Amino acid sequence: MSPHFMDLNSLIMERFIPVTTLFLDIGGVLLTKGWGHQSRKLAAGKFHLDPDEMETRHHLTFDTYEEGKITLNEYLNRVVFYQKRDFTPGQFQEFMFDQSCPYSDMIRLITKLKELNKLKIVVVNNEARELNEHRINKFQLNHFVDFFISSCFVHIRKPDADIYLTALDISQVAAKHVVYIDDVSMFVDVARELGITGIHHTDYLSTASQLAALGLKTGNLLKK
């Protein structure tokens, strides 16, 4: 049994505080990463780009893009189209968007948890506007998510604690009633420092089991 799982069991036994709200990451939890390292590596190969130069330029400007301070076109101009290419920005953007795939089991789990437990669902994620909006629409995340506290909308990125505080303010819920799920352990740690119960997501079954240990109804979804 993992230390995090034991901590969650101890917490629920000691406090019996009801969970009313889930804070969720998108990339790595509900969907694949929007524009992660592997996708950029594939793009470099497909479009015959220098992968090291692309990575350097990406890291220099992507934080600014995720905070909603530049557009996708501006990001691509800095990272790819700073010189003439034999492909168009539209073609490159289509490739970027095509990299997103759903984790259907996690989407099904969160949807069921909301239904059975009358939970408020809040996305707290670092994601650039065009990718974020594409992913929300394509995978119909707004069918079960109540609020999107995305870095591109609030101009704050994790691990800045202010993004979690903003999510608490907008959802009007106390930290003690919130569980936060993220595949990045540092981001979970920051949430815990604010009094939010954190689950470091590594796979479907461990996350579902930890949610059940917190007293949430999961139906038959633990029998995956």
Image (cartoon, helix red, strand yellow):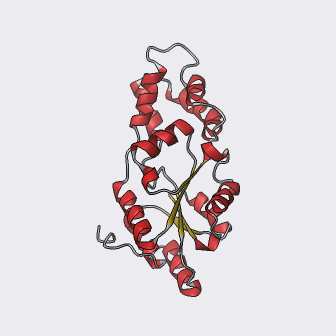
User: In the rendered view, does 111 fall on the left or right side of 68?
Assistant: left
User: In the rendered view, does 156 fall on the left or right side of 94?
Assistant: right
Q: Position of residue 16 (x, y in %)?
A: 55, 84
Question: Which quarter of the image is occupied by the N terminus?
Answer: bottom left
Front-most of 127 and 51? 127
The correct choice, above or below, for 182 with respect to 2 in the image is above
Q: Quadrant of residue 64?
A: top right
The answer to whether residue 35 of the structure is visible from this angle is no
User: In the rendered view, does 164 fall on the left or right side of 31?
Assistant: right
Front-most of 5 and 20? 20
Question: Which quarter of the image is occupied by the C terminus?
Answer: bottom left
Name the residue located 46 percent from the left edge and 51 percent from the top edge. 142
Q: Position of residue 112 (x, y in %)?
A: 38, 66
The correct choice, above or below, for 143 with respect to 42 in the image is below
Q: Position of residue 145 (x, y in %)?
A: 48, 56
Q: Quadrant of residue 152?
A: top right
Name the residue located 53 percent from the left edge and 77 percent from the top edge. 8
Task: Report the number of discs.
Answer: 0
Name the residue located 61 percent from the left edge and 61 percent from the top edge. 171
The answer to whether residue 119 of the structure is visible from this angle is yes
Name the residue located 59 percent from the left edge and 73 percent from the top edge. 177
Front-most of 129 and 190? 129
Q: Residue furthest bottom?
A: 14
Q: Position of residue 123 (x, y in %)?
A: 53, 55
